[in-house]
């Protein structure tokens, strides 16, 4: 198979009406997950309070305190106020966000395996539906430990949603559509981030807020009868008949010819699979062969550095004075330009160059952030936002890059494994923030960004390359590329014959 010819794209098109419909469904179904990623500021906020103890003299935020009167002018009720997560219990508020990261870690592993073993469709539907279920149940918990369990479960479904939805859309799209898919997959995150403060403005109690942002999406169970399986996955696991039926159905929906579909599928199957290869991938397969093993290790480290920097620097950006709801909307809207920049960059530049550039810009911006005098607040804020945008664009790109590097048989497992390290990076970030020396924290984040940029130099270039289905295709890619160049070069014999 040519590395620039996508046989599946020949059948169903790069992105027709059917794929637009699937994108709409997936985007709609993802909103509960996106809300949970950013809702901590509304359900577990840092709350002002007045201590009514006799010896406290109504001092604001006095600790320790037994008789507390919370400020309810912005948020009427929250997890913080319901279970008094202040003073010597304030660490429990931070733990609520950390446990979400642990849940995402577990979900990335579990759903990555489910997706590669049992199919993209079942993994996507299960993740979307369970996310709605767990968010809804969290509104009815009666104890703090029950809330923590619900946060963990929400995280597991969130991890599956983030990975499996992206992979399904990539595998349903043509090669030339992948840069746009990367941007389109960010639409629910950015729009959900902007919409959440608007919803929270009108729903100022945390339990109703969880219900409003979770219960309506219980209807995603119906997606089981609406979403398709990935035809690439069906071919990879040997379910050729189902793949032909699905590709024929999609081709008809997109008004494309349906002749020769069986012939094309037979060719794809023959080129992507060997008779002795395991048709179901697993995490063990990520370490069996040299190239996949190298890409797995490097990808995991890059994801960890990226997540560590992204979640860490967010501690310094977005904490603006003024109205909480307006501030969150402004912070969310600042992510939109990054999506546009990434799509344009991936269309016109090499994958590796744009990813390295994003990390380098982030690292350099953080260095300048430290060097700028503190009294120039607008300058430091500008470079902090540039750095945040740099690492955010890197986060977007690493999803697509990893999807393109790994073959279909282990693609979800690879992203799941890398996501585990991303969660570790995110989990460590608050501890770096709390070092107590701002310049030291920022320089650590800068070093992580530069480290990721260096590691990306060892990635293969994937722009314009058709998604591989089998591990052997990745392992033999350089060899087959060399053979192709040799065979395409003119030989002395052919020159003599034409003379």
Image (cartoon, grey):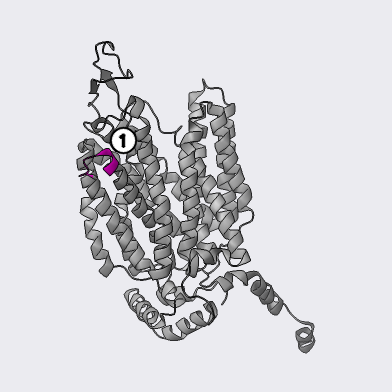
Query: x, y percentage for residue 466?
Result: 53, 69
Q: Is residue 226 left or right of residue 260?
A: left
In which quadrant is the C terminus drawn? bottom right
Circle 1 Cα neighbour tier, 10 Å, few/some/many (<14 / 14–19 / ≥20): many
Q: Is residue 239 left or right of residue 475?
A: left
Which sits in the foreground, 222 or 80? 80
Where 2 sits versus 497, above or below? above
Q: Which residues are magenta?
A: 139-146
Which sits in the foreground, 491 or 358? 358
Query: x, y percentage for residue 106?
Result: 41, 53
Query: x, y percentage for residue 373?
Result: 56, 22
Q: Residue at the spot x=77%, y=89% of the render?
A: 497
Q: Main secondary structure of the magenta part?
A: loop
Which residue in the protein does label 1 denote? 44
Examine the structure image and report whether residue 46 is included in the region drawn in magenta. Answer: no
In which quadrant is the N terminus drawn? bottom right
Q: SS of the residue at dot 1? A: loop
Where 44 sits versus 481, above or below? above
Q: Residue at the spot x=24%, y=44% of the render?
A: 210
Examine the rendering and report whether any part of residue 460 can be seen. no
Where 112 sits versus 358, above or below? below
Q: Residue at the spot x=48%, y=55% of the render?
A: 399
Looking at the image, the residue that sits furthest to the bottom is 497
Where 486 sits versus 145, above or below? below
Q: Is residue 1 left or right of residue 378?
A: right
Query: x, y percentage for residue 126?
Result: 31, 61
Examine the rendering and report whether any part of residue 290 can be seen. yes
Examine the structure image and report whether residue 144 is included in the region drawn in magenta. Answer: yes
Which sits in the foreground, 330 or 235? 235
């Amino acid at each position: 198979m040519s590395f620039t010819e996508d046989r599946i794209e020949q059948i169903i098109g790069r992105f027709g009406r059917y794929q637009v419909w699937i994108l709409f469904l997936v985007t709609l179904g993802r909103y509960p997950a996106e809300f949970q990623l950013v809702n901590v500021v509304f359900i577990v906020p840092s709350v002002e309070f007045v201590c009514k103890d006799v010896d406290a003299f109504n001092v604001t935020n006095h600790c320790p305190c037994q008789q507390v009167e919370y400020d309810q002018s912005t948020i009427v009720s929250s997890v913080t106020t319901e279970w008094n997560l202040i003073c010597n219990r304030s660490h429990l508020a931070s733990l609520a966000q950390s446990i979400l990261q642990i849940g995402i870690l577990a979900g990335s592993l579990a759903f990555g395996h489910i997706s590669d073993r049992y199919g993209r469709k079942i993994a996507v539907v299960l993740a979307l539906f369970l996310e709605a279920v767990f968010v809804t149940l969290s509104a009815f918990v009666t104890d703090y430990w029950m809330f923590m369990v619900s946060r963990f479960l929400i995280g597991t479904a969130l991890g599956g949603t983030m990975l499996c939805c992206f992979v399904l859309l990539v595998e349903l799209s043509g090669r030339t559509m992948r840069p746009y898919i990367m941007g389109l997959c960010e639409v629910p995150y950015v729009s959900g981030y902007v919409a959440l403060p608007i919803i929270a403005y009108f729903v100022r109690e945390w339990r109703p807020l969880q219900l409003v942002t979770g219960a309506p999406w219980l209807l995603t169970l119906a997606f089981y009868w609406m979403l398709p399986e990935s035809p690439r996955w069906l071919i990879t696991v040997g379910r050729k008949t189902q793949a032909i039926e699905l590709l024929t159905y999609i081709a008809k929906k997109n008004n494309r010819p349906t002749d020769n579909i069986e012939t094309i599928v037979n060719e794809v199957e023959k080129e992507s699979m060997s008779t002795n290869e395991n048709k179901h991938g697993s995490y063990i397969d990520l370490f069996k062969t040299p190239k996949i093993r190298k890409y797995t290790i490097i990808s995991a480290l890059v994801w960890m550095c990226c997540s560590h920097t992204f979640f860490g620097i967010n501690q310094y950006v977005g904490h603006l004075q003024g109205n909480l709801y307006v501030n969150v909307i402004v912070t969310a809207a600042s992510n939109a330009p990054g999506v546009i920049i990434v799509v344009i960059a991936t269309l016109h530049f090499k994958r590796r160059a744009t990813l390295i550039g994003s990390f380098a810009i982030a690292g350099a911006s953080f260095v300048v952030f430290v060097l700028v005098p503190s009294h120039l607040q607008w300058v430091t804020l500008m470079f902090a936002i540039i750095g945040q945008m740099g690492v955010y664009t890197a986060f977007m790109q690493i999803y697509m890059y990893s999807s393109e590097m790994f073959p279909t048989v282990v693609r979800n497992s690879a992203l799941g494994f890398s996501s585990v390290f991303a969660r570790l990076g995110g989990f460590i970030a608050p501890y770096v923030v709390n070092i107590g020396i701002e310049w030291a924290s920022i320089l650590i984040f800068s070093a992580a960004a530069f480290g990721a940029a260096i590691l990306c130099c060892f990635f293969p270039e994937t722009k314009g390359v058709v998604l591989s289905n089998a591990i052997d295709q990745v392992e033999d890619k350089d060899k087959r590329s060399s053979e192709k160049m040799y065979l395409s070069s003119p030989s002395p014999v052919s020159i003599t014959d034409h003379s």
